Each structure stands twice: as C-alpha cells, then as structure tokens.
Image (spheres, coloured by chain):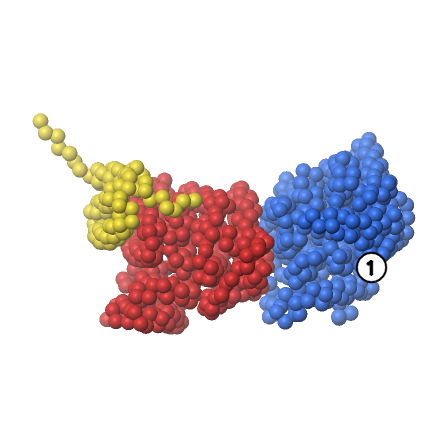
Chain colours: A blue, B red, C yellow
Amino acid sequence: MNFLSIPVLIFSPLIVALLILSPFFPNNEIKIRRFSKAFAILHFIYSTLFLLFFNPTNFGWSYQKELTFFNVSWLKTLGITATFGMDGLSLVFVILTSFLVMLAIIASKSMIRTKHRIYYPLILILQSALLGVFCAKDVFLFFLFWELELIPMYFLISQWGDRDSSAAMKYVVYTFFGSMLMLLGMLVLYFYSFSISGVLTADIESLSMSENVFAMWFQAFIFLCLLFGFAVKLPIVPFHNWLAEAQVSSVTPVSILMAGVLLKMGGYGIIRFNIGLFPEVFSNFAPLLIILGVVNLLYGACLAIVQTDIKKIVAYFSLSSMGLVLVGLGSLSEAGFEGAVFQMVSHGLIASGLLMLVGIIYLRTKTREISALGGLSQVMPICMYLGLIICLGAIGVPLFSGFPAGFMVLVGLLLSDIEPQAFLVCMIVLCVLGAVLSAGYILRLFHKTFFGSVLSQFRADTVQIDEDGNEITVVYPKRGITKSEIVVLSLLAFAIIFFGVFPNSVLDIFEVTSDIILDFMKV
Amino acid sequence: MDFLTDIKVAFLPELIIAGFVFINIFLSLFFNKKFYKTSQWIAILGVLSAFAAIGMVQAEPTYQAFNNSLICNVYTVFFKSLILVASFFVILISHKVIKKKRAKAFEHFSILFCAILGAMLLVSANDFLSAFAALEMLGISCYLLSALLKNYRAKESSLKYLISGIVASAVFLFGVSYIYGITGTINFDNLMLALEGYQGSMLFALASIMVVSALTMRISAMPFANYVPDVYNGSSYPVGAFLSIVPVVAGFSFLSRFLLIVSPYSPALGVVIMIFALLTICYGVYGALRQTDMRRFMGYSSTIQSGFMLLVLGVVNAYNISSLLYYLICYLFMALALWAGLSMFYNSTGRDDIGAYRGVAYSRPFYTTAMIFVLMAFAGLPPTSGFLAKFFVMSAIARLGFMYIIFLLVALLLMVVGVCVYLKPLRVMFEKTSENINMPNKAVFTKITLYVCTAVTILLCLYSAKIIEFCELIAYSL
Amino acid sequence: MSVVFNIGLYHYLILALVIFCIGLWGIVVCKNIIKLLVCAEFILNAAGINFVAFASYVDVENLSGLVFSLFITIFAIAELVLGVLLLISIYKYKRSADVEKLTDMKG
C-alpha cells in the first residue's frame, strides 16, 4: 500500500494545474480539457483505491504522513506540522470531492467557452485545497487549506459567469469574516492548551485530549468562535446571504462544486472541531443546533417556494438540506450523526444533479425564469428521465439517497436523549413539514420546466433572434442533450439510486469514526 | 587609536557606505553626462561590498563602540542586512529613474547612500543622541529623495513630509528630554541601570508615548501617517520602494529596543501602542479602499502593514519580537516585489491609476500571476509568507492573555477588510477590455526583482521553520 | 518693594512647555509656509531648553544634555535650510507661500 500517499493525492492536482499553466503546455483548448479530464478520472480512481485498502475497523487515522520540506517540519518551532491523515469521515469527503470535481470537469465541456487555460488549473487548485481541508490533521494546516480555497473560488465565480455582480467579493468577505473568528478560536485553543499541558502542539488528536481542564465558559467561547466560521460556510441562517447570490452568478460546474463540496467543509468542520474537540459543550449546545437546523430547513424551504429563478430554488434547497445536517448532528445519537453525514453526501450528489439540470436548461433556453419555461420533456426527453431520478432523490422518496438520510436523521432525533420530549416531537413535526415543503417546490420546479405546453421558442429547429438582432436557427442536438451531459447526469443518477438502495456502503466507511466521536460525547 | 579599532571591528559596513557617499559626490563632478549608467553599477558595488563587510564584523558578544554610543550585536547585524538587501533591490529597479535624471544620477545615489547610512546608524544607536542624529540623517535624506523628481508634486509632498518630520522630531526630543530629566542619562545601558527599582510614573509613560509616537513617523503609522500617500505619490517608484521599506525596518529596530527598556516602567504604554496600531490599520484600510492612484494605494498599504507590525509591540517579549522580525522579512520581500511590479507597469505604459491595469491579465499572464501572489501576501492569504506572518503576529497577541482578545478580534476583522483592499487591484486586472495593453519593456532588472521577490515570498512560507527559529534566536539575543 | 523670584527647574520646564505649545498651535493654524517653518523652530528649541535645564539641574557631572541641545540646533538649521529650499521651488510654481494652495494631492 505504499503507493497510497495522501500528499500525492492532495498535491497532484496542484502540480497538474501548474503544468497546464506552464508555457510548455500546448495552448489548445481541446488538449487542455482532455488532459484535465483524464487527470480527474485518474485521480478519482486513485482516491477510490484509498477506500479499497482502507480498514474500516481501524481506530484513529490511517495513511498518516507528515510532509517535510528538505527534512524540516513546516513550523517545527511552533509545534505546527504539515501532517495529513485520513479516517473514515475524511475518506467519505475525499471521494465525494474527487468524484464531483471529475463530474464538474466533464460538464465543463459544454458550459465553459472562454479562458480554458486558466479555468481548468483553477478547478484543480480548488480540488487540492478541498482535499487538504479534509485530510489535514493539524489545526492550522486545516486553516491554511480553508483559506487557500478562497482564491481559486474568487476567480472562478467572478471570471466565468455573471461578471457584473459582486457575488465573488461577497463570498470572499463572508467566508473570510467567518474564518477570522475561527482563527481566533483556534489560536486561543492552541495557546491555552499549551499553557496547561506545556506542549506546543496543534495536532487535532493531542488538542482533543486536553480540553477537559478548561472552564466551561472558556470552552464555550472557543466553541462559538469555531462554530461561527463553519456556520458561514455551511451556511446557517443569518449568514446564508452569500449562497444564493454566489450560486446564481457562477457558472454550472463551479456551482456544482460549491453546493456539492464547499458547503460540506462547514459540516466537516463542525464534526471535526466542535464535536471532536468540545463534546461536552456540544451536548449543551445541541438543542440550540437543532433549533438552528430546523430554522434553516423551514426558512430555506419557504424561500425556495417563492423563488421564480430555478437556480435560486436549487440554492435554497441546499440551504434547507444543510438544516437537516445540523438537526442530525444536534440529536447526539448515532443514527442522527450518521444520518447527518449521509445527508451531506447525498445532498452533494442531488444538488449537483439539480444544478446540472438547471445548467443544461439555461444553456439552451437562455432563461432561468420558471414562468418562461415549459414542455421541455418533449425537446429533451432523456434529460427529463434522468432529472426525474434526481428530483425524486431530492424529495426523499424511498430507494433514492435522500430517503435514508432524512429517515436516519428523524430516527436519530426520536432516539435522542435530549429533554424534554415535547421539544423533540415538535422538532420532528417541523422536520416532516420541511420535507413536505421540499416535495412541493421540487415538484413545482420539475413540473413547470418539463411539462405543460411547449413554448414555441423551445421547439427544435425554430428561428430565434439573438442578442445582436440576427436571426439564427437553433438546432438542438439529437435528443436535446450532449454526450458529456448525459454522462454527468447518469453517473449522478446512478449514485443516487445506488446509495438509496445500499446506504450501508457509505455508512460502513465512517461507522468506527462516528463511534469514537460519539463515545467521547457520552463520557 | 580607539576610534579606528571601533570602526575596524564593528563598523566597516557603515564606513564603506559613507565612503560611497563621497565617491558618488566626487564622481558627480566629473562623470555626469556621459557615464550616468555606471552610477547604478557603482551603487550596487557599494551595497554589495557593505554586505560583504557585514560578515566580518564582530557581533558576538555585543561590541560597544564610540564611547558606548553605538553597539554592534546579532540583532543590529540582522537589521543592517535587511536594510542592505532592500537597498540592493531598490537600486536594481531604479534603472529607469537614473535614465531620466542623467546629469543627477550620481547625486541621487549619494543621497540614497546617506539615507542607508542613517538607517544603519539608527539600528546601532545605543543612546538617544546617536539615535537622534541617525533619525535626522535618515529623515533629511528622505525629504531630499522625495523632492528629487522635477515636478511640482514632488516639492509639495516633500514639504509636507518635512513639516511632519520636524514635528515628529520635536515630539521625540521632548519625550527624550523628560526621560533624561527623570533618569539623568541618555545612554541605554545606563538608563537600564538607572531605572532599576523605579516604580514607574505617568510622566515617564507620557514621555515614552511621545517618543513612540514620534517614531511612528518613520514606520508610517498613526498618529504621523498622514503624509505617507502624498509622499509616495510625489516620488518616483524606486524612491517610494525605499521609503516604504528602509525607514520602516530601521524604525522598528529602534522602537523595539526602546520599548524593551521603557515598557516595564510605563503603565498604559502597551495599550496606547495597540490602539495606535489598530487606528493605523483602520486609517490605511479606509484610505486604500477609495484609492485610484496606485502610488497612493501603496502608501496606505504600507500603513496597513506597519499597523500589523506595531500591534505586536504592545507587549515586548521574545516571542512578539521574533514575530515582528519574521513579519519584517516577509514585508521586505513582498513590498519589493509589488513596487517592482508597479514600476514595471508604469515604465512601459506611463500610467499609474488603477484603471490602467484593466485587462492586464489577458496580455501579461506571468506578470499577473506574480502580482496575484504578491497581493495575496499583502492580504494575508496562503500559500504566501504574508499569511504566515499575519498568523504569527495574531498568535503572538493571542498568546498574551485573555484581556488582549478584544484587540485580536478587531485586528482579525480589519484583516477581512484588508482582503477587500488588496483584491481590488486584482479585480481590475481581470476586467475585460477591448484595448490591448502593450507592455514592451526590456527592464530585465525590474523583472528579476519582481520574480525573485515573489518566489522568496512563497518560499518563506514553505521553508519557514528555519527562518522562524532564526528570528527567535535573534529576538532572544536582544 | 521688590519680589525676588527664585527661579528653579520647573520654571524652565514650564517655559519650554509653553513655547512647545505655541509652536504646535502655530503649525496647526498658520497658513503661511514661512510661519510654519518658524513655528517648527519654536518646538525644536523648546525641547532644547528642556535639555539645557535638565543638564544643569539633574545631570550636572556629565552635561550630556548640553551636547544634545547643540545637536538640536545643528539639525534644526539643516531642516530649516531644506524647508526654505522647498519653499523657493514651490513659490516658483505657485507664486504664493500659502499652505491652502498646496492642494495638488488629495485623497
């Protein structure tokens, strides 16, 4: 298993990105695209190898490796090292990341028209940063990758997509604001554990051992600082403003990565830091998190119902789904915890699928207004069938991946030890209400776009007037959808059904990890 | 001869720099018109030979020279080498300026060397008298340097610089006179002895605050920061680079040595300094956000960076000073890279407003890549040394205790706004434009400066363990 | 009737402080560059008075304050020369020595 090295996994996208940027690489759009596609597929295969050789019953971190620079640790004098490791939880998100990056690069074929030379490297750098976040075993290494993700994301949002909007800046400011408070919490944690234990270290495992000696209010302070950083990313309701705007003004593959992976960074951070380092505080704050989660769920759903822009509906769907994650984590039970993680994976797939559908529709009709769409099932039937699977997953129909996630969260809530029972029952009722609302807006989205009378401008081979006033004949490709789009949609649909039927295939990976984390909380 | 041994043992670099001041003046009498290009080579030779001489001085143990008015130890040697490295790159990028000056090229370099000499003496100063003399030497040379361009703006900005400089030195002198009155000595070593057992008083704290606020003039921090953008705007790019680095480095070296002595006896000094620092960052961020001229932008930007450096001096201990030293190293290289990048652009297009950079990303990808890294370093984003430097500074404040959390919080929030400031030029660079930007420059040295300093900025982040260890070593030697 | 003033250290210090304040106030309110330069001389020399006073009352054996005040005078002259130089070249452009007219740079 020596060929499985986490630094290679993390930094190979970065190196490939630099290779594409270097002047020796042919400046040919097709070559760049094919090269990055081939790399992304290889990378996905490589990351699945980690799963094959992963021992799910292994306690603690696997594949641990410290990266040194000419045999010198990164910040040795400060006790900060560039150590990477993987446990079941990281592995799930690593595979999700490289899967979605692969799909995003495949989808870019029809979505990206300009500046390929910069676009593909940026996506790959983003991938490096994301993998780094999920594999970092050192608090400040985690922070470094967390910040590193901002830069490619800034350019990806601002350069491809709606150029006039300030969404990219808003995204950066929100995230940076959150991450600064996170840094505050991390620094305080780091120095106070040093002042107590006398060992200067930023290793997550060693820090988690030393938390019990702090006063409770002090732990709560650090906890809230960290939670704030993750809350902006997840997003939790008062800080959700950037999400819809960034989603709407960015191009489809970028929004896939944003909804599919970037939001999960927040959830991963809450599990790794807030639960992993402060189990006691977390169990005190759990009712608050459940309430926040339910607010997220309902608020997102309500906003999604009133939207007329189909991409915004999907954005608020993401907000609503992340509420379920919070509820699951707050329930403090094994089923709830596993349901939350499963919900993150499943939402990654479903939101990507929905965004892909929206992207495909927008590419052909040049509109995202729900009232201007209709009858597309006649023009692009294959798209409709695949879209149906994805929408069913989003609603949470049994046998699709949305169902086990939501179901486990609710079961977790039911089994939770939180008092009083009436509170839990209320919350369960509200969660079910959220699920019903989600069925409402997702079905509305699906129905209004694919069914109804075919609007004349969407008929195949009709004459349209483009922006400059010239008459052009819009020729839809055969079956209304290109090959690369079919690949993306069907892979997502396959994954949604597969995880819906065999949820254990994901749950088994991180079962031991979740046991460890929950054991901490019980003690 | 005591005097000569002092020079031979510890002050050879200063002697060489002083020698080159006279060489330049002498050459300006004879070789003005024709051989102006050689002036750059002679200046480089001067800096390099001074750098070589630094290796020969006795740094361990501390050497006291000239009746204990100047000292030489590891700390001063470190700062002197920073100053010389900065001056080396500044001379490299002043290629275009001497071409424009022609007849005055040698004189330009003689003033520049005077300023370097003043900065190096300020680093070494061990009593208030030599510190004052060095400050004035640095100051007067800087006023002259900023007045060197042949236009009205240069004169106006230089006058503003001069007036605020005079006020600053008067405040400095007033503060020093009270310290002198309380302790009866102006020598740092004697001062330390005299202060032993001193209870500390408000008057002493007031005197220290006066000295510190006068020194903020050199490090372009509040309350004496108003002149900075004007002066950078009025001077040429290499001079701007020089002014934003060398006085700052020298000022911080003196400031931390001064604070090390007085801070235990001055109640409230630390809080005042931290408030100064936060005000400085606020002022810089506010100014930079609405700036369209790149040189003024640089002025505010160096104010922001000085604010972050000043923040750690609120409490003086080895950890804080080592974080300051690391920040200074990083700041040196990123500022040099950014000034080189800007001057490269100015030299080929002749424009310095931010709008001129529209669409540079499409015609000059490598230039833009370097600029992205440099601006990211200024903003404090990874993977550049700016991130690590800011991180180090923040960790130094977090380490001080829970009552400093509020300062840390404000500084972190200001960093968020700082990111907006530094992303602004980047955003302009990526705006679509129809006009093709033509940058036909052959300025090899400027390019070398830009790319080398950018590479160093990134490497300092990766290879930081050794550098930080080194900084801690120097901080402990203080 | 004659009142004998016993002049001590504090009288010098108060004098210096008053001169310093006058100079600072002048720098803030004066509109003319020449007046500004004169006020600058005021504040520098106020510090000089402090040094001389302390040298003769506190530090009698070393008298380093006297040396200091000598240096202050020298550098004050150097700065004044530079100031006048800049004043002349500004006058060439603007035909005036009014500070209010120095508004080419803003922001």
Could you say where residue B232 lies in the image, as x and y percent from the top left? Answer: 40, 53
Q: Please name whichever residue, A420 or A507, is drawn nearer the observer in this view of the structure.
A: A507
Identify the chain of the residue marked 1, using the numbered disc in the image: A
Q: Quadrant of the N terminus of chain A?
A: bottom right
Q: Secondary structure at mark 1?
A: helix
Q: Nearer the viewer, residue A131 or A106?
A: A106
| Residue type, numbered disc 1 | Lys
Q: Position of residue B120 (x, y in %)?
A: 35, 62
Q: Is residue A248 visible?
A: yes
Please, which residue is most extreme toward the top here? C1
Find residue A208 and report its horizontal and vertical position in percent: 68, 51
Residue A203 horizontal side relative to residue B403, left or right: right
Task: Give the residue displayed 58% in from the left and 60% down from the top.
Answer: B362
The residue under label 1 is A483
* Closer-to-camera residue (B283/A189): B283
Q: Residue at x 33, y 60 (%)?
A: B115
Q: Is residue A418 above or below residue B253?
A: above
